[in-house]
Amino acid sequence: MSTNTTPKHGDPAVRPGVGGFLQVKDLRVHFPTDDGVVKSVDGLSFNLERGETLGIVGESGSGKSVTSLSIMGLHPAGTAKISGQVVLNGDNLVGASPEHIRKLRGKNMAMIFQDPLSAMHPYYTVGHQIIEAYRVHNSVSKQVARKHAIDMLDRVGIPQPGSRVDEYPHQFSGGMRQRAMIAMALSCDPELLIADEPTTALDVTVQAQILDLIRDLQQEFNSAVIIITHDLGVVAELADDILVMYAGRGVEYATAHEIFTAPQHPYTWGLLGSMPRLDRERTERLRPIQGTPPSLINVPSGCPFHPRCTYAELNGGASETDRPEFVEISPRHFLACHLSERDRQRVWDNDIKPTL
Amino acid sequence: MRGIQQRSHIVTSAPADATTPPSRVAGQNEDLLVVTDLQKHFPIRRGLLQRQVGAVQAVDGMSFAVRKGETLSLVGESGCGKTTTGRMLTRLLEPTGGTILFEGRDITHISAGKMRPLRRDVQMIFQDPYGSLNPRHTVGTIVGAPFHLQKVQTEHGTKKAVQELLELVGLSPEHYNRYPHEFSGGQRQRIGIARALALKPKLIVADEPVSALDVSIQAQVINLLEDLQDELGLTYVTIAHDLSVVRHMSDRVAVMYLGKLVEIADRTPLYERPMHPYTVALMSAVPIPDTGRRTKRDRIRLQGDVPSPINPPSACRFHTRCWKAQEICSTIEPSLAELSPGHRVACHFPENLIDLPMPTVHAGSSGSPQD
């Protein structure tokens, strides 16, 4: 795991969406429905290098899962209107043919889903599913593929892989199923691994094992990893950089260390402040973010967070009318917020920092 | 959210640093609920004659008490039996062994008819805000159902009572005619809470009340549950797996593993000096939102998954995954012993024993305290 003190991007003025193994530039994913257009992702940019981990943090309706499905090309044809760019190793995936994407999926990019029981086919053995994935991208015999599947199961820590390779998903416990899914995802050595809430459905001790496993495998395969979660503890464990999403947009993007020690966006402050934490003194009351996440059909005008933001009125009405740009406020720290530098610093020093 | 502003006038009536809400003053700590050797085995039947060939030993010998006005949390991972225990407390399941005393009365095996009036006093909040509300009923019907089922007369009519309840949980009285699908997860959970409160129960069993909710909404609902407890003098038994939430909400915590109670203590001693190795491992596994701790953490990694409750390990059920296990652990089951006031542990080699008088449990050969 790379230490996050030396930026591996090199140039400190690197902007999200410019350069990098995976570049996402101004991604927009809209779903036309009878009730209106659902703007699940509305202008998202970030980039990622191999060997690094990006954590995408957000709650329900932030667009984080839709982002990962868009990168993988998993939206059924005709449902989503996707614009912008998703460039994987120089290859633009938006607008590419489904055949092209299918060649890349599994081999160059792979995904781990939240609930392995619904993500794996219940009628086929685990071995069959891994072998199928492997043989789609490599022309080898069944025996060779089977050996590879057993090796992968062993690599992810499943005991007795030689016999478990012929078992069905329902015969595995939750943690073991998730490991099997990781084995399936990594069987073709993908360069990009997307993990969508990989441990939400798991017990905490099993979660710890899976996170360790993802970290170890990333070091071994030098993959780029995107981990999508609402759990800030999980991203603190794994991520080098963190992108906070709200209402389909990035609101803050910085190194993990910065996000936890010097966050700058009121939504990030709200998230950090509303969680009970084991490593802090217990407070009498939690400080929730007032209100509820917005509808993605009727996204609030201007800054989508403004109805819930305690500091919106400090901006003289700009929060209600103008959408804040996602700009670099300090090296490798990007923010979409109307608060002036001075106001933000003052609020941080007086209101937020003492309470975190 | 409007509900929160409405709640604030109740909260600010108590001083900001109040640590002992009025309902929990000394003298009120009689036991509301006493559970002794509680057991639930689910039979496994095979063959034409459906003979019992084994049993899922979901809960096996739980003993604890719940004082009036406090919050006791049952924590543990999948398969530990905490949900089964919660359902036995509300008599949605009938125990196969042991006793449950509610306000001194034995409710372990009483009939449904005799249990019915008691259901006014013991209510449940469920985990899944989407599955626990009938999608074909309006909010008014859902929250009003307890009044009709128990044939309770209200002063100004059921509708008025329901609307007051909706306001109490931070919803608007206009939501009376809406259907569950028109609400978000957090709001649905509030509806479930309103329903549980309808008949002014004494005890509420909350099964994972916030785990299905977003982080920012969790905080709202947790605050609500705490405010309601202070205002209405409620007693909670919470079932949860999120240790950070549990620490915030609980007065006492009981840790379960594979159907057994392995440790029970007041909140602060449990989190500061956990004694059972499983509790120690559980605490160390929780991801902390602090990047500085990433490399320095001394995490205990448990091998493998929890064994099956159909065939649990002998004696101490944790011995197959415990790094301190010795032969005695697989032959003699450790009993729950009070190793410090109010802190009971079932282990032959507990952790964090500092300056404690040696109990009768074999703790003499335990390692040095965990730092």
Image: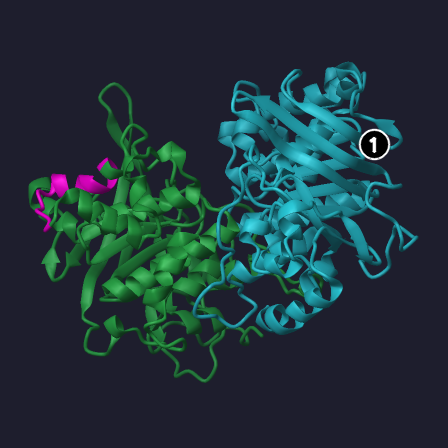
Chain colours: A cyan, B green
**Count of numbered circles on the image:** 1
Given residues A156 and B312, the one toward you in this image is: A156
Relative to residue A352, is residue A187 drawn left or right? right
Relative to residue B181, is residue B59 drawn left or right? left
Instruction: Give the residue at x 39% y 51%.
Output: B314
Above or below: residue B179 compared with residue B347: above
Q: Position of residue A277 (x, y in %)?
A: 53, 63
User: In this rendering, does residue A30 appear at all?
Assistant: yes
What is the quadrant of residue B232 in the picture? bottom left
Identify the subunit bearing mark 1: A
Relative to residue A190, is residue B317 drawn left or right? left
Q: Secondary structure at mark 1?
A: strand
User: In this rendering, does residue B65 appear at all?
Assistant: no
What is the quadrant of residue B70 in the picture? bottom left
Given residues B144 and B297, the one toward you in this image is: B144
Q: Which residues are magenta?
A: B141-155
Given residues B171 and B269, the one toward you in this image is: B171
Residue tagged 1: A88
Instruction: Give the residue at x 56% y 25%.
Output: A36
Does the magenta stretch mainly form a helix, a strand or a loop? helix
Q: Position of residue A276 (x, y in %)?
A: 50, 62
Instruction: Give the residue at x 31% y 41%.
Output: B174
Residue type at mark 1? Answer: Leu
Instruction: Give the residue at x 79% y 47%.
Output: A52
Q: Looking at the rendering, in which quadrant would you find the C terminus of chain B? A: bottom right
Given residues B80 and B89, the one toward you in this image is: B89
B145 inside magenta stretch? yes
Q: Position of residue B56 (x, y in %)?
A: 33, 40
Q: Position of residue A45 (x, y in %)?
A: 77, 40
A253 inside magenta stretch? no
Above or below: residue A267 compared with residue A159: below
Above or below: residue B104 compared with residue B15: above
